[in-house]
Every structure is written in structure tokens, then in C-alpha cells.
Image (cartoon, rainbow, N blue to C red):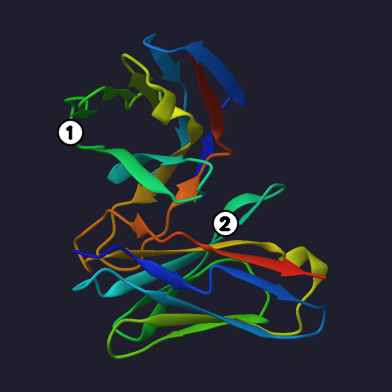
Amino acid sequence: AQTVTQSQPEMSVQEAETVTLSCTYDTSENNYYLFWYKQPPSRQMILVIRQEAYKQQNATENRFSVNFQKAAKSFSLKISDSQLGDTAMYFCAFMKQNQGAQKLVFGQGTRLTINP
Amino acid sequence: KAGVTQTPRYLIKTRGQQVTLSCSPISGHRSVSWYQQTPGQGLQFLFEYFSETQRNKGNFPGRFSGRQFSNSRSEMNVSTLELGDSALYLCASRGGQGTDTQYFGPGTRLTVL
């Protein structure tokens, strides 16, 4: 079974700073996807970024980028120029690459607070 | 496109009752998954439906069931509610086979008294 671990329960940074959230996972699969979702106080789960395991290039989405280390089974999220609206719970998630049934396996989350 | 919608947004029930939650996926999406979120257990997968068939089920008791209709809308039912069923229930949709990204609805907050 796959497991996802987020070792930082809470983090707090000042606005405009850069912050990195850590995530490690355990799997015997070779083909899979990794995701970061954010959940603001509204509780809506929002996709931040996705990464296919077969791609060596790290995914980026505007201020958000990942550092994907497949051999180390590490998938960290970097937020540059952090904004107050980035305050949220951030969840790292794993999904096997499968033409059939799929499910997300989530980490416990990191509560990120951006201070003015 | 409109996003995933869930109804109702909030629900209060008492122990022993049953409840039905509804989820309408993004237009064109054929797969619907359900997740339970609690402070203690985090986010846990309940089940996935694709083209009206349950394709995957998490480790939950038989009191938790679901179904999907021909228009891809899905319902989740919990019978004989227990206090521990209090949670945020999230629904997510994706395009179907070969597509990997799940998009979430706003959730239904269920409180069992």
C-alpha cells in the first residue's frame, strides 16, 4: 500500500517570502502521479500542481513549483513571493497510474500561514 | 465549465438515522470519487464510480454505499449513522479513463448528534 508523509504540521512565513513544503511517499509502483492540493478556510480543495512520475522535468505553475526526486521518493512544493491568499492547508497526494480505478492517497497536510 | 457541485452543504442528523449526499460532476466527466475528511483520520477514500459502476472501494463498513446515475451524478448513502461519521464529505470528478486529475467539490459537512 502507498503512504504519503508530510512532516511539517504547521508553517508560518511573512508575505513575499519563499516557503517550501515537504512530502515523501512510499510505493513500489514505477508509474504514478503526484499532486499538491490546497484547502483554504472555505474547505474547497483546489489543485495546485501535478507531476507525472515518468517526467524528469519538475512541474511549475506560476509561483508554484515542485522538486521531484523519484529515487528519494520526495516531492516538495515551493511557493515563491507568497501572498496572503496562499494561507491554507496543503495536501500532498499520490495516485497510481492505472487505466481503471484510481484513488488519491493523501498526506496529513501542512497548515501554512502567510503573515502580513 | 461549472465546477463540481455538492448538496446539501451542511447537514445535521442524529445517531441511527440515514443520510444521502449528492454530487454533480463537471460536465463531461464520467468518474466520481468520494472522500471522507476528519481531523483524526485525515482524508480517506470511500469509493469511485465510473459509468454507473463502482470500480474501487475504500476500507469503510457496508453502511457506506453509493451509486451513479446515467448522467454521471452520484449519491452517497450512510445508514445507521454513528457519532464517528461526523465529517466533511468531498466529491471529486475526473474525465474518465486515461485522465488522472480529480477536481473537488465544496464538500458536505455532516454532523451526527
- Residue A27 can be seen in this image: no
Work out how far the residue at label 2 is from the one at label 1, CA to CA, in angstroms.
27 Å
State the image quarter where residue B36 is shown: bottom right
Asked if residue B109 is positioned above or below residue B39 in the image, the reply reads below
Residue A74 at x, y percent in the picture: 41, 25
| Side of A56 relative to A41 (left or right) | left
A86 vs B111, left or right, is left
Q: Nearer the viewer, mark 2 or mark 1?
A: 2
User: Where does residue A96 sit, x and y in percent of width and height?
Assistant: 35, 51
Label 2 with label 1: CB-CB less than 8 Å: no
Q: Which label belongs to residue B44?
A: 2
Image location (x, y in percent) of residue B21: 54, 78
For the point 38% across and 21% down, the residue is A83
Which mark, by number, is residue B31?
Answer: none
Q: Identify which residue is drawn at 32% across, 14% down.
A: A81
Tag 1's secondary structure?
loop
Q: Residue furthest bottom?
A: B70
How many residues crowd around disc 1 within 10 Å: few (fewer than 14), some, or many (20 or more)?
few
Q: Which chain is home to disc 1?
A: A
Q: Quadrant of the N terminus of chain B?
A: bottom left
Local crowd size for mark 2, using a 10 Å CA cut-off: few (<14), some (14–19), many (≥20): many
Quadrant in which the C terminus of chain B appears: bottom right
Kind of residue sitting beneath label 2: Gln
Residue B88 visible? The answer is yes
Chain label for disc 2: B
Q: In the depicted view, which residue is nearer to us: A1 or A105?
A: A105
Quadrant of the image occupied by residue B73: bottom left
- Assign a secondary structure to mark 2: strand
**Residue lying at the far front of the rendered structure:** A116
Image vertical order of residue B45 relative to residue A92, above or below? below
Q: Circle 1 sits on which residue?
A: A55
Report the amino acid beneath label 1: Lys
